[in-house]
Image (cartoon, rainbow, N blue to C red):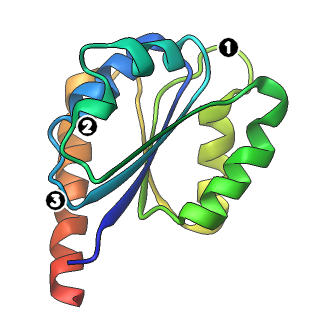
Amino acid sequence: MKPVRLLVTARDPSSANDICSLLHMLPDNFEVLVAAQNPAYQVFSTSANSPFLTNCSTRVLFNIGDDLVSELIDSILNQFSPSIIITGVSSLGHGIDEYTLLAANILGIYQLFQFKVIGAMLILALACFLIICLSLINMHSS
């Protein structure tokens, strides 16, 4: 079965915690690439819920500085070619999440982003539903 490629981005630490919980629910046919900015990077790299402790086949973690966001995200989108993108909320300014959503929208890539107002549980449920749908589509196309 063809793997589902998932790009995850975050800068906000609470988003990183929520996303780590989601990553632990993914089946092993997912390839996950994590691109983060501090302080989310610290959560991803040191948390007991680290994405490195999941069943997913690929776990790559980048710590991206503000000056390299656009260049590295463009490179990741073109080379990794994700099926779906999940982002956190970068809060103030224009961080990795905002740029990733903009670039993904231009390329037509499925994307989910975390709204604090809606709450993490609803986002996790939506993400799981979309991931299941993509897995079913992949199974039927193989």
Residue under the image location 41 percent in, 21 percent down:
44
SS under mark 2:
helix
Sequence-earlier tag: 3 or 2? 2
Instruction: Give left or right: position of 68 versus 51.
Output: right
| Identity, as a three-letter code, of the amino acid under mark 3 | Ile
Q: Nearer the viewer, mark 3 or mark 2?
A: 2
SS under mark 1:
loop
Sequence-earlier tag: 1 or 2? 2
| Identity, as a three-letter code, of the amino acid under mark 1 | Leu
* Mark 2 neighbour density, 10 Å: few (under 14) some (14–19) many (20 or more): many
Numbered label attached to residue 132 = 3
Where does label 1 land, which residue?
Answer: 92
**Residue 116 appears at what percent x and percent y?**
39, 18
Distance CA(mark 3)–CA(mark 1): 32 Å
Say which quadrant the N terminus sits in: bottom left
Distance CA(mark 1)–CA(mark 2): 25 Å
| Identity, as a three-letter code, of the amino acid under mark 2 | Leu
Say which quadrant the C terminus sits in: bottom left
Numbered label attached to residue 23 = 2
Up the image or down, 37 lies above or below 139; here it is above
**Residue 100 appears at what percent x and percent y?**
62, 44
